[in-house]
Amino acid sequence: MTLTLENVWRTVGDEVHIAEANLSLERGTLNTLLGPTLAGKTSLMRLMAGLDKPTKGRILFDGQDVTGVRVQDRSVAMVYQQFINYPALTVYENIASPLRIARASADEIDRKVREAAAMMKLEPMLDRTPLELSGGQQQRTALARALVKGADLVLLDEPLANLDYKLREELREELPRVFAESGAVFVYATTEPTEALLLGGNTVTLHEGRVTQFGPTLDIYRNPGDLLTADVF
Ligand code: DCP
Ligand code: MG
Protein backbone atom coordinates (compact mmCIF):
# COMPACT_ATOMS: atom_id res chain seq x y z
CA MET A 1 0.00 0.00 0.00
CA THR A 2 2.22 2.78 -1.15
CA LEU A 3 -0.11 5.12 -3.01
CA THR A 4 -3.29 5.73 -1.07
CA LEU A 5 -6.20 7.96 -1.99
CA GLU A 6 -8.58 8.76 0.84
CA ASN A 7 -11.95 10.17 -0.18
CA VAL A 8 -10.41 12.23 -2.98
CA TRP A 9 -12.61 14.64 -4.91
CA ARG A 10 -11.84 17.01 -7.73
CA THR A 11 -14.48 19.49 -8.78
CA VAL A 12 -14.02 22.29 -11.28
CA GLY A 13 -16.80 24.84 -11.03
CA ASP A 14 -20.02 22.82 -10.98
CA GLU A 15 -18.40 19.83 -12.67
CA VAL A 16 -17.37 16.79 -10.69
CA HIS A 17 -14.31 15.27 -12.39
CA ILE A 18 -13.44 12.79 -9.61
CA ALA A 19 -15.76 11.79 -6.76
CA GLU A 20 -14.97 9.92 -3.56
CA ALA A 21 -11.92 8.02 -4.78
CA ASN A 22 -10.60 5.51 -2.26
CA LEU A 23 -7.72 3.35 -3.46
CA SER A 24 -4.51 1.72 -2.27
CA LEU A 25 -1.96 0.77 -4.91
CA GLU A 26 1.19 -1.20 -4.26
CA ARG A 27 4.70 -0.95 -5.61
CA GLY A 28 5.71 -3.56 -8.14
CA THR A 29 2.13 -4.19 -9.28
CA LEU A 30 0.64 -3.06 -12.54
CA ASN A 31 -2.61 -1.19 -12.04
CA THR A 32 -4.77 -0.62 -15.09
CA LEU A 33 -7.09 2.34 -14.91
CA LEU A 34 -9.93 1.23 -17.14
CA GLY A 35 -12.83 3.35 -18.27
CA PRO A 36 -14.51 4.79 -21.33
CA THR A 37 -13.65 8.22 -22.64
CA LEU A 38 -14.44 11.03 -20.12
CA ALA A 39 -14.58 8.53 -17.23
CA GLY A 40 -11.88 10.52 -15.45
CA LYS A 41 -8.70 8.51 -16.13
CA THR A 42 -6.55 11.52 -16.93
CA SER A 43 -8.12 13.51 -14.09
CA LEU A 44 -7.30 10.76 -11.58
CA MET A 45 -3.72 10.43 -12.84
CA ARG A 46 -3.19 14.18 -12.59
CA LEU A 47 -4.30 14.03 -8.95
CA MET A 48 -2.01 11.06 -8.25
CA ALA A 49 0.91 12.91 -9.84
CA GLY A 50 0.37 16.17 -8.00
CA LEU A 51 -0.39 18.05 -11.22
CA ASP A 52 -3.83 19.00 -9.82
CA LYS A 53 -4.86 19.46 -6.21
CA PRO A 54 -7.82 17.56 -4.81
CA THR A 55 -10.77 19.69 -3.79
CA LYS A 56 -11.20 17.32 -0.87
CA GLY A 57 -9.45 14.25 0.57
CA ARG A 58 -5.87 13.10 1.10
CA ILE A 59 -3.19 11.43 -1.01
CA LEU A 60 -0.44 9.47 0.74
CA PHE A 61 2.74 7.97 -0.71
CA ASP A 62 4.72 5.50 1.41
CA GLY A 63 2.70 6.75 4.37
CA GLN A 64 3.64 10.38 3.77
CA ASP A 65 0.95 12.95 3.09
CA VAL A 66 1.63 14.33 -0.40
CA THR A 67 -1.71 16.08 -0.85
CA GLY A 68 -1.01 19.27 -2.73
CA VAL A 69 2.71 18.52 -3.11
CA ARG A 70 3.64 19.57 -6.61
CA VAL A 71 4.87 17.06 -9.17
CA GLN A 72 8.25 18.82 -9.32
CA ASP A 73 8.84 17.98 -5.66
CA ARG A 74 7.97 14.29 -6.03
CA SER A 75 9.40 11.23 -7.74
CA VAL A 76 6.89 10.88 -10.56
CA ALA A 77 7.19 9.97 -14.24
CA MET A 78 4.11 10.55 -16.37
CA VAL A 79 3.62 9.97 -20.05
CA TYR A 80 0.74 12.16 -21.10
CA GLN A 81 -1.94 11.13 -23.52
CA GLN A 82 -0.71 14.09 -25.58
CA PHE A 83 2.91 13.19 -24.88
CA ILE A 84 5.61 15.84 -25.09
CA ASN A 85 9.18 15.70 -26.39
CA TYR A 86 11.86 18.37 -26.64
CA PRO A 87 11.94 19.13 -30.37
CA ALA A 88 15.36 20.80 -30.36
CA LEU A 89 17.14 17.90 -28.65
CA THR A 90 18.17 14.57 -30.13
CA VAL A 91 16.26 11.45 -29.17
CA TYR A 92 19.28 10.49 -27.04
CA GLU A 93 19.07 13.76 -25.11
CA ASN A 94 15.30 13.55 -24.84
CA ILE A 95 15.68 10.20 -23.10
CA ALA A 96 18.68 11.38 -21.06
CA SER A 97 17.04 14.54 -19.74
CA PRO A 98 15.74 13.21 -16.38
CA LEU A 99 19.16 11.68 -15.71
CA ARG A 100 20.93 14.95 -16.51
CA ILE A 101 18.58 16.79 -14.14
CA ALA A 102 19.40 14.18 -11.47
CA ARG A 103 23.15 14.74 -12.21
CA ALA A 104 23.83 11.09 -13.05
CA SER A 105 27.34 10.23 -14.27
CA ALA A 106 28.02 10.16 -18.01
CA ASP A 107 28.52 6.36 -17.87
CA GLU A 108 25.25 5.79 -16.07
CA ILE A 109 23.40 8.07 -18.47
CA ASP A 110 24.80 6.28 -21.49
CA ARG A 111 24.02 2.82 -20.12
CA LYS A 112 20.46 3.66 -19.10
CA VAL A 113 19.65 5.59 -22.28
CA ARG A 114 20.87 2.72 -24.46
CA GLU A 115 18.95 0.15 -22.39
CA ALA A 116 15.72 2.14 -22.64
CA ALA A 117 16.28 2.84 -26.34
CA ALA A 118 16.81 -0.87 -27.02
CA MET A 119 13.62 -1.72 -25.19
CA MET A 120 11.68 0.88 -27.17
CA LYS A 121 13.37 -0.06 -30.48
CA LEU A 122 14.82 3.40 -30.87
CA GLU A 123 18.51 2.56 -31.23
CA PRO A 124 18.79 3.71 -34.88
CA MET A 125 17.04 7.00 -34.02
CA LEU A 126 19.21 8.23 -31.16
CA ASP A 127 20.95 10.95 -33.20
CA ARG A 128 17.77 12.30 -34.79
CA THR A 129 15.35 14.85 -33.37
CA PRO A 130 11.74 13.98 -32.51
CA LEU A 131 10.52 15.99 -35.48
CA GLU A 132 12.17 13.45 -37.77
CA LEU A 133 10.29 10.54 -36.18
CA SER A 134 6.93 8.91 -36.79
CA GLY A 135 4.17 9.44 -34.20
CA GLY A 136 4.83 5.99 -32.75
CA GLN A 137 8.56 6.65 -32.46
CA GLN A 138 7.84 9.93 -30.73
CA GLN A 139 5.62 8.15 -28.27
CA ARG A 140 8.30 5.52 -27.65
CA THR A 141 10.77 8.33 -26.94
CA ALA A 142 8.43 9.65 -24.24
CA LEU A 143 8.07 6.12 -22.81
CA ALA A 144 11.84 5.62 -22.78
CA ARG A 145 12.23 8.86 -20.86
CA ALA A 146 9.74 7.63 -18.26
CA LEU A 147 11.64 4.37 -18.05
CA VAL A 148 15.09 5.85 -17.32
CA LYS A 149 13.79 8.19 -14.66
CA GLY A 150 13.47 5.44 -12.05
CA ALA A 151 10.54 7.23 -10.41
CA ASP A 152 8.53 5.89 -7.45
CA LEU A 153 5.28 6.53 -9.30
CA VAL A 154 4.94 5.86 -13.04
CA LEU A 155 1.78 6.99 -14.79
CA LEU A 156 1.18 6.08 -18.42
CA ASP A 157 -1.92 7.64 -19.95
CA GLU A 158 -3.12 5.53 -22.90
CA PRO A 159 0.52 5.03 -23.83
CA LEU A 160 0.20 2.61 -26.73
CA ALA A 161 -2.57 4.35 -28.64
CA ASN A 162 -0.36 5.58 -31.49
CA LEU A 163 1.68 2.44 -31.98
CA ASP A 164 1.27 -0.20 -34.63
CA TYR A 165 -0.18 -3.56 -33.72
CA LYS A 166 3.07 -5.50 -33.57
CA LEU A 167 4.91 -3.06 -31.33
CA ARG A 168 1.87 -2.70 -29.12
CA GLU A 169 1.86 -6.44 -28.55
CA GLU A 170 5.57 -6.46 -27.73
CA LEU A 171 5.26 -3.59 -25.28
CA ARG A 172 2.21 -5.07 -23.62
CA GLU A 173 4.36 -8.08 -22.83
CA GLU A 174 7.42 -6.09 -21.79
CA LEU A 175 6.09 -3.10 -19.88
CA PRO A 176 4.61 -4.92 -16.88
CA ARG A 177 7.86 -6.76 -16.25
CA VAL A 178 10.02 -3.67 -16.64
CA PHE A 179 8.00 -1.56 -14.29
CA ALA A 180 7.45 -4.39 -11.78
CA GLU A 181 11.22 -4.77 -11.61
CA SER A 182 11.59 -1.03 -11.04
CA GLY A 183 9.53 -1.40 -7.85
CA ALA A 184 7.46 1.66 -8.73
CA VAL A 185 3.75 2.12 -8.27
CA PHE A 186 2.72 1.65 -11.88
CA VAL A 187 -0.58 2.93 -13.27
CA TYR A 188 -1.64 2.44 -16.88
CA ALA A 189 -4.77 4.11 -18.27
CA THR A 190 -6.72 2.61 -21.14
CA THR A 191 -10.19 2.50 -22.63
CA GLU A 192 -9.57 -1.06 -23.84
CA PRO A 193 -10.72 -3.95 -21.62
CA THR A 194 -8.63 -6.40 -23.66
CA GLU A 195 -5.56 -4.36 -22.83
CA ALA A 196 -6.27 -4.73 -19.10
CA LEU A 197 -6.68 -8.48 -19.58
CA LEU A 198 -3.40 -8.81 -21.46
CA LEU A 199 -1.54 -6.76 -18.88
CA GLY A 200 -2.90 -8.72 -15.90
CA GLY A 201 -2.23 -7.17 -12.51
CA ASN A 202 -4.99 -5.19 -10.87
CA THR A 203 -7.70 -3.13 -12.46
CA VAL A 204 -9.43 0.02 -11.28
CA THR A 205 -12.63 0.64 -13.21
CA LEU A 206 -13.84 4.21 -13.49
CA HIS A 207 -17.24 5.48 -14.49
CA GLU A 208 -18.28 9.12 -14.50
CA GLY A 209 -15.49 10.09 -12.14
CA ARG A 210 -16.13 7.29 -9.66
CA VAL A 211 -14.12 4.17 -8.89
CA THR A 212 -16.59 1.39 -9.47
CA GLN A 213 -14.33 -1.64 -8.94
CA PHE A 214 -10.81 -2.42 -7.83
CA GLY A 215 -9.10 -5.80 -7.65
CA PRO A 216 -7.24 -8.46 -9.62
CA THR A 217 -8.03 -7.97 -13.30
CA LEU A 218 -9.15 -11.56 -13.78
CA ASP A 219 -11.60 -11.37 -10.87
CA ILE A 220 -13.18 -8.25 -12.36
CA TYR A 221 -13.32 -9.85 -15.77
CA ARG A 222 -15.07 -12.94 -14.38
CA ASN A 223 -17.42 -10.93 -12.20
CA PRO A 224 -17.86 -7.50 -13.70
CA GLY A 225 -20.73 -6.53 -11.39
CA ASP A 226 -23.94 -4.81 -12.27
CA LEU A 227 -22.51 -1.43 -13.15
CA LEU A 228 -21.19 -0.85 -16.57
CA THR A 229 -20.63 -4.30 -17.87
CA ALA A 230 -20.95 -3.09 -21.40
CA ASP A 231 -18.49 -0.25 -20.95
CA VAL A 232 -15.87 -2.16 -19.07
CA PHE A 233 -15.73 -5.82 -20.07
N1 DCP B 1 -12.93 17.58 -18.32
C1 DCP B 1 -13.16 18.89 -18.69
N2 DCP B 1 -12.16 19.65 -19.23
C2 DCP B 1 -10.94 19.11 -19.40
C3 DCP B 1 -10.68 17.78 -19.03
C4 DCP B 1 -11.72 17.05 -18.49
O1 DCP B 1 -14.27 19.37 -18.53
N3 DCP B 1 -9.96 19.85 -19.94
C5 DCP B 1 -14.02 16.80 -17.74
C6 DCP B 1 -14.74 16.00 -18.73
C7 DCP B 1 -15.04 14.74 -18.01
C8 DCP B 1 -14.11 14.66 -16.85
O2 DCP B 1 -13.49 15.91 -16.79
O3 DCP B 1 -16.34 14.83 -17.49
C9 DCP B 1 -13.08 13.57 -16.94
O4 DCP B 1 -12.27 13.74 -18.08
P1 DCP B 1 -10.89 12.98 -18.29
O5 DCP B 1 -10.13 13.71 -19.32
O6 DCP B 1 -10.25 12.78 -16.96
O7 DCP B 1 -11.39 11.57 -18.84
P2 DCP B 1 -10.56 10.39 -19.51
O8 DCP B 1 -9.13 10.64 -19.41
O9 DCP B 1 -11.10 9.13 -18.90
O10 DCP B 1 -11.06 10.41 -21.03
P3 DCP B 1 -10.23 10.03 -22.38
O11 DCP B 1 -10.27 8.54 -22.51
O12 DCP B 1 -11.04 10.70 -23.46
O13 DCP B 1 -8.87 10.58 -22.26
MG1 MG C 1 -7.64 10.85 -20.77
Image (spheres, grey):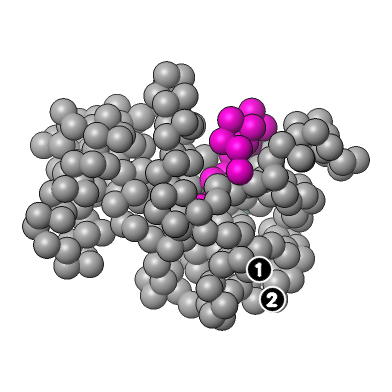
* Percent position of residue 3, x then y: 58, 66
Q: Tags 2 and 1 in contact by the CB under 8 Å rule? A: yes
Q: Quadrant of residue 128?
A: top left
* Percent position of residue 212, x then y: 79, 51
Q: Is residue 228 above or below residue 166?
A: below
State whether label 2 is within 8 Å of ligand 1: no
Q: Nearer the viewer, residue 30 or 190?
A: 30
Specify whether residue 200 is painted magenta.
Answer: yes
Q: Is residue 150 left or right of residue 221?
A: left
At a point 18% along the width and 41% down the height, the residue shown is: 114
* Percent position of residue 97, x then y: 22, 56
Find residue 57 and name its label. 2
Q: Is residue 63 above or below residue 27?
A: below
How many labels were placed on the picture? 2
Q: Quadrant of residue 225?
A: top right
At a point 55% along the width and 51% down the height, the residue shown is: 29
At a point 69% along the width and 76% down the height, the residue shown is: 57
Specify whether residue 193 is painted magenta.
Answer: yes
Where are the magenta residues, as a range?
186-201
Under mark 1, the amino acid is: Leu
Kindly tell me whether residue 27 is visible in this rendering. yes
Q: Quadrant of the C terminus?
A: top right
Kindly tell me whether residue 67 is visible in this rendering. no
Q: CA distance from mark 2 to mark 1?
A: 8 Å
Residue occupied by mark 1: 5
Q: Quadrant of residue 122?
A: top left
At a point 56% along the width and 57% down the height, the residue shown is: 45
Q: Quadrant of the N terminus?
A: bottom right
